[in-house]
Amino acid sequence: MEPVAIPEVDLETLRCEIRKEYAEVARQPGKGFHFHTGRPLARLLGYEDAWLDGLPEGSIESFAGTGNPFAMGALRPGERVVDVGCGAGLDTLIAARMVGAAGRVLGVDMTEEMRTKAQASAARLGLHQVEVRAGHAESLPVEEGWADVVISNGVVNLCPDKLTVFREMHRVLRRGGRLQIGDIAVQKPVPEASKRKIDLWTG
Amino acid sequence: MVAAGFEGFEVTWRADVFTGAPQQSSAAQFGTLGINFHARRPEVRS
């Protein structure tokens, strides 16, 4: 099998720019971005209104996913879930209500402003099964084999080394565990020179 | 996905999720679509 080429982009510079962009999505969700956000986006992606009912607006308005991890099957009561790149916590909160008080949902995000919103929403709802940790998709702060399900939404595409990300998701899943991801795919080849342009990663 | 150790990889949905966004995006330039996919870690050691 051909090795997966990793784009030549400075990882720390890229992460810095991504953090800046998503801190803005957290602070000023109505500003207008190159992607849709909030409740209209959730509807576009097929989120059921019932999933959003009663969730804090702070988590809904800063939602910036590209797919719907729950469209591939609901999570089961008692399951342990890792939400990779949890952002302001919309998917984390939906997952927490699906798995119930006997389950656990661990949200991981590298942007402090997003983590703050996710934690505040979980606290407001009294969802004690939610924990939010700082971390990166390439090195998740989760023990091996902990999760029944790994979800993520619009995050893998922001990581240059996708094989490392998927290996990390594999590591934290138990055997037989499920990966349910929303992300993006391109239909036309992206030139190598374009992959090195940081602004294309964030916009 | 296979190289990472997963099995049962399947893309279950794809759609244009960028058209009409408030700021111009590079997404259309590359035919970018939102997708859903799933896979699982095998029951046996992989």
Image (spheres, rainbow, N blue to C red):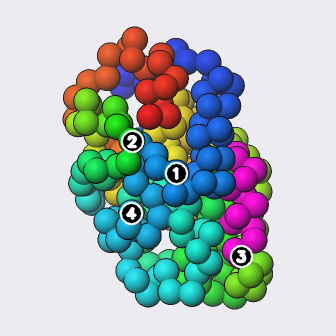
**Can marks 4 and 3 be said to lie on one chain?**
yes
Q: What amino acid is labelled 2 in the image? A: Gln
Q: Mark 1 lies on which chain?
A: A
The boundaries of the magenta stretch are A110-122
Separation (CA) of disc 4 from disc 2? 15 Å
Q: Is residue A121 left or right of residue A83?
A: right
Q: Tag 4: Cα neighbours inside 10 Å, few (<14), some, or many (≥20)?
A: many
Q: In this view, does A122 lie above or below A159?
A: below
For disc 1, the marked residue is: A31
Secondary structure that dominates the magenta span: helix
Considering depth in this image, is A33 or A153 the residue closer to the camera?
A33
Q: Quadrant of the N terminus of chain A?
A: top left
Residue A41, which numbered label?
4
Residue A19 falls inside the magenta stretch = no
For disc 3, the marked residue is: A122
Q: Is residue A28 left or right of residue A75?
A: right
Q: What amino acid is labelled 3 in the image? A: Ala
User: How many marks are shown on the rendered structure?
Assistant: 4
For disc 2, the marked residue is: B23
The answer to whether residue A95 is visible is no
Which element carries disc 4, helix, strand or loop?
Answer: helix
Which element carries disc 1, helix, strand or loop?
Answer: loop
Q: Quadrant of the C terminus of chain A?
A: top left
Looking at the rendering, which quadrant does residue A79 occupy?
bottom right
Q: In the image, which is nearer the foreground, mark 4 or mark 3? A: 4
Separation (CA) of disc 3 from disc 2? 31 Å
